[in-house]
Image (cartoon, grey):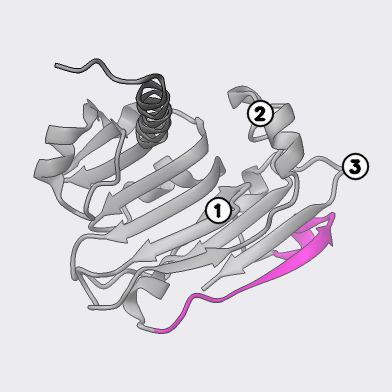
Amino acid sequence: MVPPSGCSLLVLGALGVFALGCFARAQKNGTLIFTKENTIRKCSCSADIRDCDYSLANLMCSCKTVLPFAVEQTSYNDHLTIWFTDTSALGPLLNFTLVRDLKLSLCSANVLPTEYLAICGLKRLRISTEAKHPSPEQSLLIHDGGERESREKPMLLHQSWQTCMYISFLDMALFNRESSLKSYSIANSASMASNFPYFSYFKTFPVLSNKSYVVTFIY
């Protein structure tokens, strides 16, 4: 057998580095949370899982069961995907939680009520309603402000509530419609409780008097 030449070794080495880089990118974990039969499963997945494929998620991801009353306030700086069949668990999971990149997949044909989720720091939202409407996934870019700062100064979990300068209100009734995602934003809102008196969220939200906020409504 003829030993490989120096040029061949160089090519093989370059291919090895390329393959290793691709593998490392593929192994970047995302968080998947799904609710089913009154249980919440929280998973770390190294690859995208087909929407609402619970069996595949349990097989391919590292998952654990979380009791509904044990859900803790946390933050997600990477991708977060949530599969759900109704809105009962979404409030404890998402209200005033820091989420940069969120995908919500409806895994049932249920009609959802007009309820609002209040999400901090949301930059991109994706929704899938394939179980209800045979329509493609929708994506909405909300804002890109503060990206450099968030990379340089990761937000501490216990600080995420107090430093929430971007607040998105998501109308869950949008999953009942086949229309495109829409949004509008109100910048420099310094007195949210008076500007939005019908939103009870602001009665408990720790608003800082010397800060202004960007409020986005998604519908």
Do labels 3 and 2 touch, CB within 8 Å?
A: no
Query: Which quadrant, please, contains the N terminus?
Result: top left
CA neighbours of label 1 inside 10 A, class few (<14), some (14 to 19), many (20+): many
Task: Indicate the secondary structure of the residue bearing disc 3.
Answer: loop
Mark before the other along the chain sequence, 1 or 3: 1
Residue occupying image coordinates x 81% and y 40%: 208
Residues at marks 1 and 3, CA–CA distance in whole angstroms? 21 Å
Residue occupying image coordinates x 36% and y 81%: 177
Residues at marks 1 and 2, CA–CA distance in whole angstroms? 18 Å
Q: Vertically, is 161 above or below 165?
A: above
Residue type at mark 1 is Ala
Q: Give the number of the disc on residue 199.
A: none
Percent x, y of residue 70:
34, 26
What residue would you read off at disc 3? 210
Percent x, y of residue 136:
32, 74
Task: Indicate the secondary structure of the residue bearing disc 1.
Answer: strand
Percent x, y of residue 58:
14, 35
Q: Vertically, is 84 above or below 6?
A: below
Start-end of magenta stretch: 179-196
Residue type at mark 3 is Asn
What residue would you read off at disc 2? 155
Residue type at mark 2 is Met
Residues at marks 3 and 2, CA–CA distance in whole angstroms? 19 Å
What residue would you read off at disc 1? 118
CA neighbours of label 2 inside 10 A, class few (<14), some (14 to 19), many (20+): some
Residue reaching furthest to the front: 2
CA neighbours of label 3 inside 10 A, class few (<14), some (14 to 19), many (20+): few
190 within the magenta span? yes
How many numbered badges does the structure rendering display? 3
